[in-house]
Amino acid sequence: MATLILTAVGTAIGGPIGGALGAIAGQAIDQRLLAPKARQGPRLGDLSVQTSSYGAAIPRLFGSLRVAGTVVWATDLVETRSTTGNGKGQPKTVNYAYSASFAVALSGRPIRGVGRIWADGKLLRGAGGDFKSATGYRLYTGGEDQAVDPLIASAEGLDQTPAFRGIAYALFEDFQLEDYGNRIPSLTFEIEADAGAVAIGDIASDLAGGAVIGAATPTLGGYAASGDSVRGAIAALSDVVPLSLADDGTVLRLIVPGGDATMLAAAEETTRRALVRRAIDSVPDEVSLTYYDRDRDYQAGLQRAAAGGGPGRNADRLSLPAALPAGAAKGLAEYRLAALRAGRVSAKAGYGWRHAALRPGGLVRLDGQSGLWKISRWTLGPMSTALELGGVPGGSPPEATADSGRPIAAPDLVQGPTTLRLYDLPLGSPPAGTPLLFAFAAGASAGWRRADLIASFDGGESWQPAGRAGPATIGTALTALPARPSTLFDADSSVEVALLNDAMWLEGASDDALAGGANLALVGDELVQFGNAEWLGERRFRLSRLLRGRRGTEWAAPGHVAGEDFALIASDRLVTLTAPEGSIGGTAQMSAHGIGDPADVVAAKAIEGAALRPPAPVHLTAARQADGGILVRWVRRSRDGWSWPNGADTPLGEQAEAYRLDISGDGFARQVALSEPAFLYSATAQAADGAAAPIGFAIVQLGTYAASRAAQFTLD
């Protein structure tokens, strides 16, 4: 392992002899900066795993880096209980949510800011500063005037709350834990401690409080320093780049190979030069360097350098808690390998006092030998200076060509604002006369995930929880469907729809799947099913092979216009809202709030009770009889019987079978209450009414809670 070497050089007053004496004295100075038993710096795993151990070292961060931090304060989990569902005869649903508040120390020195935040490897905070899960968030950058956090103070008492001055930390308040198994997730933070890359010399200077100066030192994208001294803090760097510290009488200077080198002539040697060359197989022929790859969201990367380009028989493995591009890491690995191979050659030689100003860590060239040599040991003797030297590579670490590989990055999708739609549809089986409404929520951004819903049935005077909406598949019809009957497949018509965001998708379904209810969608006010879905690009689809007027909505087939709503009916994507009994004719209001909503999104819908209404009767006929009477017949349908049972009648679905028949014409009108699907309009009744052709018939089924739409027929 490379070590940091200290010497002191005397002032110019003493000349070479004074410098030599200063060098001897310098071996004992400033042990606080260069304590030989410094705590080890952080390894890669230390930065990626969040801890809460008491007394754990908090690294001092430089440049830009991704770290986990240390939890320094936390509350217990907080349980929140809510109840949804209030329909008569329907049990209420009790929901539980959990949250926690906690603080995470990030750096032992001030930082500029925090970028992205990951929770269990998924993005919690995007590059734009948006959060993907609900939480309060405050960042304290570590200034010496840092104030006490009010939440911690309220929990611990102002006198017991530290301000953590000099330590950068993040405070999360009411962090919602639903997305993370109701536990505090493992967080990692993208920290910007300094603007741009930072030089190794600047790192050492900062850690030493300005007592160290480094010139022309390599730069790093980011670095995490830890330890009780400068030596400990940059020891991991000295493993990769040979570093030396020398005292020039004023400050400590950080020296790296590649600077000016003094030529030592063979004629000046007072003691014959002795060279020791170890066998080539005594040093590693491969170096592998693990680092944080800046281009892969700071995930751990590995670069290798091998002698001859093949796999090495003896590998030197290093971990560097620094953020680097792949090419720079490859260059450091190659430089380390060159240093190991150059260092297998050492030399000893004696020179006169003219070279007493040389100091450990300095660079020289030897007459008759190639390359650079570093002074590893210096001994002052009678009128002589003895040097022990080791070979070092010349120049600075190169920028090599390397590939980071394909990054596995968490998608940074902004949730964005909520689009909320509220419909009264003939779906479901409402209990005991309570109308049902259906909420669809989504966002124009593909990152939209969910929104919490509340509802009001009294004009906004009171609100109640209505559940949580997930991303529904909704959009807009770009073309208008023509009117077609609902009895057979509509193979001639199609409709083009544009979905709300690029993450939404539609797929076709077989006829068997359609018979089972697949691909039910709302287009305007008509429920249809589609067998074919052709992608047209840019969120657009053409839907064809249609089944029209599903669940009694054939009445809406003639009224389509371009620009009307489209919504895919999927039970796991819509929220069912139970309105109070007797609320038909009133208005429901719903409010949605998602993470990306600057304000609540509100939708309103008149309550018609579509789920309570029987579908309109079908196959209405009116035929004149031989005696002049008109026999009117129809077939009822049921809101509880949309399948086609074999050999059995459709269930009634109401408490009693009842109808209202309206007969009208020029100057007359008659209304009849019936209990069976037929009526004879006798010649006598026609004469009493003054009925003359054309005569209109409209039949309505009277359900238990609401009436159907009218089925109409005109007899000429």
Image (cartoon, helix red, strand yellow):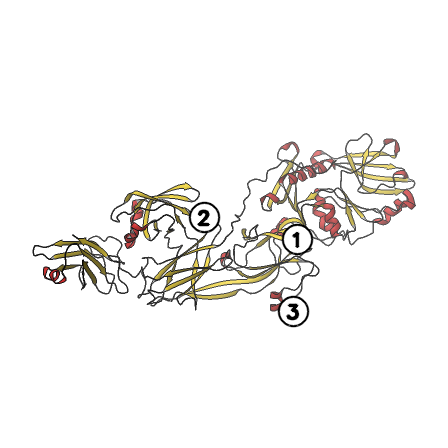
Which tag, 2 or 1, sits closer to the chain's start? 1
Which residue type carries mark 2? Answer: Asn
Q: Is residue 516 visible?
A: no
Question: Mark 3 or mark 2: which is in front?
Answer: 2
Q: Is residue 281 left or right of residue 405?
A: right
Which residue type carries mark 3? Answer: Leu
Which tag, 3 or 2, sits closer to the chain's start? 3
Question: Mark 1 or mark 3: which is in front?
Answer: 1
Residue in the foreground of this view, choosing between 68 and 483: 483
Which tag, 1 or 3, sits closer to the chain's start? 1
Question: Mark 2 or mark 1: which is in front?
Answer: 2
Q: Is residue 521 left or right of residue 18?
A: left
Image quadrant occupied by the N terminus: top right
Q: Which residue is mark 1?
A: 112
Q: What residue do we see at 28% from left, 63% from top? A: 706
Marks 2 and 1, how far apart at CA: 35 Å
Q: Is residue 133 left or right of residue 151?
A: left
Q: Is residue 509 left or right of residue 453?
A: left
At which x and y percent is residue 306? 65, 35
Mark sitting on residue 546: none
At which x and y percent is residue 180? 51, 56
Q: What crowding class fits label 1: few (fewer than 14 Cα within 10 Å), some (14-19), or many (20 or more)?
A: some
Residue in the foreground of this view, choosing between 246 and 685: 685
Question: Given contact means CB atoms under 8 Å apart, are the residues at marks 2 and 1 in contact?
Answer: no
Q: Secondary structure at mark 3?
A: helix
